[in-house]
Amino acid sequence: MAQAHRDEPLPPDWCRSLPRPEYKALTRVESADPWFEVYRVRPGVFAIYEPHQFEEVISYLIVGKNKALLFDTGIGVGRIHDVVSRLTTLPIIVLNSHSHYDHVGGNADFAEVLGVDSAFTRKNALGDVNHYGVSDALSPDRLCGSLPQGVSRETYRIRPWRITRFIHDNETLDLGERKLVVLFTPGHTPDSLMLLDRDNKLLFTGDMFYPGPIYLYTPETSTDDCKKSIERVAALVPQLELLLPSHNVPVAQPIQLIRLRDAFHDVEANRVKGVPADGLIEYRFQGFSFLMSPKKPQ
């Protein structure tokens, strides 16, 4: 999702719809921190879910033979380092799907953090530069329950982190008997990316796709880049068995990428009418929507 926004629509009673039914089909694993729920999605793949905050962020621990990769570190309220340390004793590499605050909150607790060589990433690595936006994420109406002991909206910050190495498009990360291909998919942000586990037919989609309103309204979003990135990953559908999104639920069908591509084309061609949503426009489709500024993409 995007940086917190004062006009971001908040469905009434959103908390009452939890838990989402998709989680019932997954194996739940004990979590070292009650802020998180952990689910085994596939062998060696754990979804680390934050159900107590409106973003419903999902980070992923992907375990190889020699190393493990943590794809995102959440909003930073819980101790995700403790969670992953209980799940594996292997060295952990962090890579973010993008550097919005809700995906980098635990970065500072890890020694090895990979990143995209972009001005957007480097700026966000300095930590909380927009305290209103970040603290708004912890307002009472965006919480399901209470914050962990010792955490408050007033003092909450995204801590600075150090990028230990820049990564490249199409780079392969070898974890030992598990290889992940980095796919740059700018659009939602300039540094958005996905991870392709080709051998296991998995695609970790970040914020490019998830079931729910997909945020495409912030200044850093480029609809032109979105279109190119969606086209790129839609072409992968015949190779895939499962999508693993970064919000709401950790499982989705690859055909959704085709529907995403077609829906974006419909919006671009003005074939679908948007619905006003608290100062934004929502274009609704089956299983997802686009949340955009009132100005339609050209």
Image: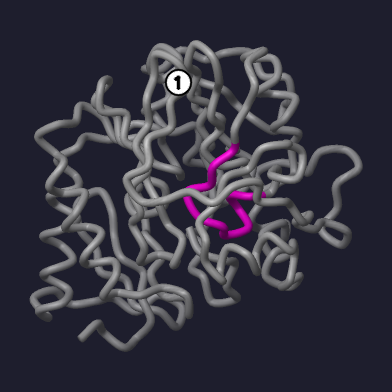
Position of 91 with respect to 170 (left or right) is right
Which residue is located at x 18 percent, y 66 percent?
A: 264
Q: Residue at x 88, y 38 (%)?
A: 149
- Specify the quadrant of the image occupied by residue 270: bottom left
Q: Is 67 rendered above or below residue 19?
A: above
Residue 24: x percent and y percent? 41, 19
Q: In what element is the residue under mark 1?
A: strand
Tell me the residue at 19%/45% (across/down).
Answer: 256
Q: Is residue 98 magenta?
A: yes
Image quarter in which the C terminus is found: bottom left
Q: Is residue 57 left or right of residue 222?
A: right
Location of residue 7 in the rendering, given as x and y in whole percent from the top left corner = 54, 77
Q: Outermost residue toward the right?
A: 150
Q: Residues within 10 Å of mark 1 (few under 14, many from 20)?
A: some
List the residue tagged with mark 1: 45
Q: Residue at x 88, y 59 (%)?
A: 155
Of residues 59 and 114, which is closer to you in this image? 114
**Considering only vertical position in the picture, is 93 above or below 188?**
above
Q: Quadrant of residue 99?
A: bottom right
Give the camera-side residue of 72 and 49. 72
The type of residue carrying mark 1 is Val
Residue interval drawn in magenta: 94-104
Number of marks: 1
Pinpoint residue 221: horizontal percent, then vertical percent.
41, 73
* Magenta span contains residue 244: no
Q: Residue 133 location in percent, x, y?
A: 67, 70
Q: Is residue 81 left or right of residue 14?
A: right
User: With respect to residue 275, does 54 lie above or below?
Assistant: above
